[in-house]
C-alpha cells in the first residue's frame, strides 16, 4: 500500500507513547487499536493534536463483553482511518468524556448516553439529543439488547385490533 | 369574495417546507423541482420562510415523537385555507419504519392531508403533477 510508511510511522509513535495497546489491521485503510479505558482521553488528544487526525464519528455497541465504544479518527492526508476501541463494563458503564480534548465529540456522546446509557464524566452538556423531550421515560435505552421494542410501538390505524 | 382569495392561491401558491424526521431525500427532490430544469417557479410557486406566509405545506418525513408538537404548531400557524401535500412514502404510510419505537404514525393521523405523492423519493415530475392535482381540488 502506498501509505504504508506513513501508517507505520504513526503506529510507532502511538505505541511508544501508549504501551498496552494492540493493533488489528483490518485492511490497508482501516486499523483498530484497542486502548484501555483509563487512557482514552490521552489517546484521543494525541491523535487529534499531535498526529493531526480529525474525529469522524463514534460508534457504541452492546456486545457480550460489555459496551464497546469505537472512536474513528480519520487521517485525511493518507486516507487511513484509525479506530480507537475501548470496552466499558455493563454493570457500571462510566467512561471519561473526550469532549474537553476533542470538541467534535459533543453530540455523539450525548446520543450514546441517551440510547445506550453510558455515562460520560466531564461532559459539558449532557442533555438528551434525539429522544422526545415531552413524553420519553428517562430510564429506557433503545439500543441495548434487552430493550423490549414491542412495548413502545404505537398501533397503526390499519392494524386490526 | 371567496373566489378572489382562491384565485390568488391557485395562480401562485406559496409553499412552506416541513421536514419532520426525514432522511432528506425527498427534500432534495423538492429543491430540485425549484431549479431551472424542472422550474416550478414559472407557476408562481415560491418557497417562503415562515408558515404564516404560506398557502401550501409540503410535508415530508415520518413523524417522530420529538417533532410531533412542532409539526402541529406549524400547522396551526398556517392561515387557512391551506393545502397539505404529503411527499414521499414515509409521509403516506411510514414506509419501512412502521414498527419503530419512535414513530407516531403517518401524517393524516394528526393533520388533514389533501394529496399524497408516493415514491422514495418521488421524481420532480411527480411532485409537479401532485401539486397541480392539489390545486385542481380547490
Image (cartoon, coloured by chain):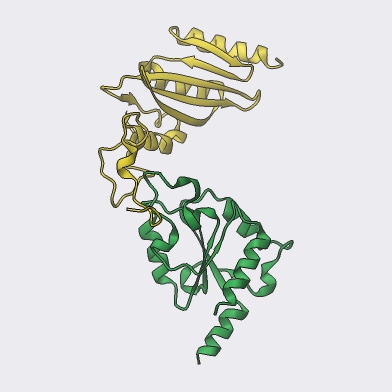
Chain colours: A yellow, B green
Give residue B109's position: percent from left, percent from top.
39, 61
Q: Is residue A124 visible?
A: no
Which residue is farthest right? B37
Which residue is farthest bottom? B1
Camera-nearest residue between A158 and B103: A158
State the residue at coordinates (68%, 62%). Answer: B125
Q: Specify whether B95 is left or right of A98.
A: right
Q: What is the count of numbered marks?
A: 0
Q: Is residue A141 visible?
A: yes
Give residue B47's position: percent from left, percent from top.
58, 67
State the residue at coordinates (44%, 76%). Answer: B79
Give residue A42's position: percent from left, percent from top.
42, 19
Give residue A62's position: percent from left, percent from top.
38, 25
Specify the quadrant of the image occupied by residue A142.
Answer: top left
Above/below status of A19 relative to A77: above
Q: Specify whether B42 is left or right of A94.
A: right
Above/below status of B62 relative to A142: below
Image quarter in which the N terminus of chain A is found = top right
Specify the quadrant of the image occupied by residue A124.
Answer: top left
Camera-nearest residue between A97 and B134: B134
Camera-nearest residue between B124 and A92: B124
Specify the quadrant of the image occupied by residue B7.
Answer: bottom right
State the residue at coordinates (61%, 11%). Answer: A8
Which residue is farthest front? A160
Amino acid at each position: 500500500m502506498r501509505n504504508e510508511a506513513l501508517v507505520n510511522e504513526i503506529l510507532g509513535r502511538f505505541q511508544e507513547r501508549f504501551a498496552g495497546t494492540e493493533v488489528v489491521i483490518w485492511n490497508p485503510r482501516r486499523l483498530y487499536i484497542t486502548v484501555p479505558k483509563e487512557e482514552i482521553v490521552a489517546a484521543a488528544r494525541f491523535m487529534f493534536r499531535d498526529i493531526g487526525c480529525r474525529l469522524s464519528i463514534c460508534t457504541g455497541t452492546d456486545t457480550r463483553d460489555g459496551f464497546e465504544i469505537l472512536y474513528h479518527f480519520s487521517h485525511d492526508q493518507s486516507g487511513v482511518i484509525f479506530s480507537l476501541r475501548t470496552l466499558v463494563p455493563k454493570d457500571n458503564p462510566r467512561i471519561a468524556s473526550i469532549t474537553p480534548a476533542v470538541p467534535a465529540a459533543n453530540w455523539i456522546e450525548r446520543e450514546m448516553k441517551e440510547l445506550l446509557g453510558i455515562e460520560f464524566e466531564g461532559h459539558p452538556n449532557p442533555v438528551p439529543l434525539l429522544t422526545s423531550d415531552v413524553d420519553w421515560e428517562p430510564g429506557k435505552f433503545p439500543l441495548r439488547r434487552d430493550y423490549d421494542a414491542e412495548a413502545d410501538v404505537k398501533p397503526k390505524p390499519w392494524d386490526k385490533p | 369574495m371567496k373566489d378572489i382569495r382562491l384565485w390568488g392561491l391557485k395562480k401562485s401558491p406559496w409553499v412552506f417546507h416541513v421536514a419532520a424526521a426525514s432522511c432528506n431525500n425527498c427534500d432534495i427532490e423538492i429543491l430540485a423541482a425549484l431549479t431551472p430544469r424542472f422550474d416550478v417557479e414559472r407557476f408562481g410557486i415560491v418557497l417562503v420562510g415562515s408558515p404564516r406566509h404560506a398557502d401550501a405545506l409540503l410535508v415530508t418525513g415520518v413523524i417522530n415523537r420529538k417533532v410531533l408538537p412542532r409539526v402541529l404548531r406549524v400547522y396551526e400557524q398556517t392561515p387557512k385555507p391551506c393545502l397539505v401535500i404529503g411527499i414521499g412514502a414515509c409521509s403516506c404510510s411510514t414506509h419501512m419504519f412502521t414498527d419503530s419505537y419512535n414513530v407516531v404514525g403517518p401524517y393524516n393521523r394528526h393533520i388533514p392531508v389533501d394529496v399524497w405523492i408516493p415514491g422514495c423519493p418521488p421524481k420532480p415530475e411527480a411532485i409537479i403533477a401532485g401539486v397541480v392535482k392539489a390545486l385542481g381540488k380547490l
